[in-house]
Amino acid sequence: MDRKLRAELEPLGVRMLDGDVLALALPTPTLPPATTTNHYVIGRSRALLVDPATPDRRAQDKLHQTLALLTANGWQFQALLLTHHHHDHVGAAMPLSQRLDLPIWAHAATATRLAGEVTVHAEVSDGALVAQDADGSQWRALHTPGHAAGHLVLQNDQHLGMIAGDMVAGEGTIVVDPRDGRMADYLASLERMAQAKPAFLAPSHGAVLPDAQAVLRHYREHRLAREAKVRAALPTKWTPPHDLLPAAYGDVARRHWPLALRALLAHLIHLEEQGLAQGDRGLWRRAG
Ligand SMILES: [Zn+2]
């Protein structure tokens, strides 16, 4: 990237990452301690803005300004792509789509979740080539359900950088809530990401994670360790999940327990799928 453009992008807060990936962190109503969502630009001859997330008007102006500057410098934007349907990823999708006359792309399951709120113009399926860098390298979408049913990550086939969405976080934690996701899928998706051997992970919240394999291994091990705690806490008599929180999530601050309860349920469902727990009308007990 030439120095003049670099000098124009820096005051807007745009960070330049490996493989020509650009990142702009803008405010969103996300899960504390995170306060922003990273807006990534990938590709150049076929460029995408990933997660037009901010609902803040002034931040949207900044985003618009950034995209206009890039367009004037040869970026050819094709679409706005959503990694998944959560509100801290889609807040600027409709206004920006109209302002820039760009379509919104997302996985079919994301489109279903957003029906009536955000119009998805084209569905992106697993393996689809979605963007292209100036050097001809291609960006491919991988379907990675678990945190959200329609979650996509994006990987460059030559530089192997990966836009990781909410599969991992540089700041805060990733919640697997059974209303949106599934623990078995999440664990399988982490495995699939590891197999794709990303050079780095660019998450939606927080800084880039350079040691991708270690991060993915840590996330997997952390979930399995938590699940072992849930399993150990589960008695043979029917129990409301809330009663398992002190034993399984005692290390988590009480103010986070409502979220922990969602994660606990995701683990109980996963244990049930493995024949290790039994659930009935909101009560759970040990099985197997
Ligand atoms: Zn999310």
Image (cartoon, grey):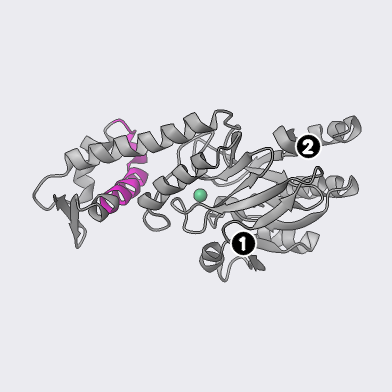
Q: Is residue 221 left or right of 228 when viewed as pictured?
A: right
Q: Is residue 45 left or right of residue 222?
A: right
Q: Please give the range of residues in magenta.
A: 251-269
**Residue 56 visible, this angle:** no
Mark 1: C-beta under 8 Å from nearest atom of ligand 1:
no
Q: Does the magenta stretch include residue 73?
A: no
Q: Residue at x 31, y 47 (%)?
A: 261
- Residue 262 magenta-highlighted: yes
**Which percent across, then down, holds residue 275?**
20, 53
In the image, residue 232 lies at what x, y percent? 18, 38
Percent x, y for residue 61? 77, 49
Q: Mark 1 points at which residue?
A: 124
Which type of secondary structure does the marked residue at label 1 adopt?
loop
Q: Nearer the viewer, mark 2 or mark 1?
A: 1
Q: Which residue lies furthest to the bottom in this view?
A: 116
Question: Which residue position holds label 2?
Answer: 12
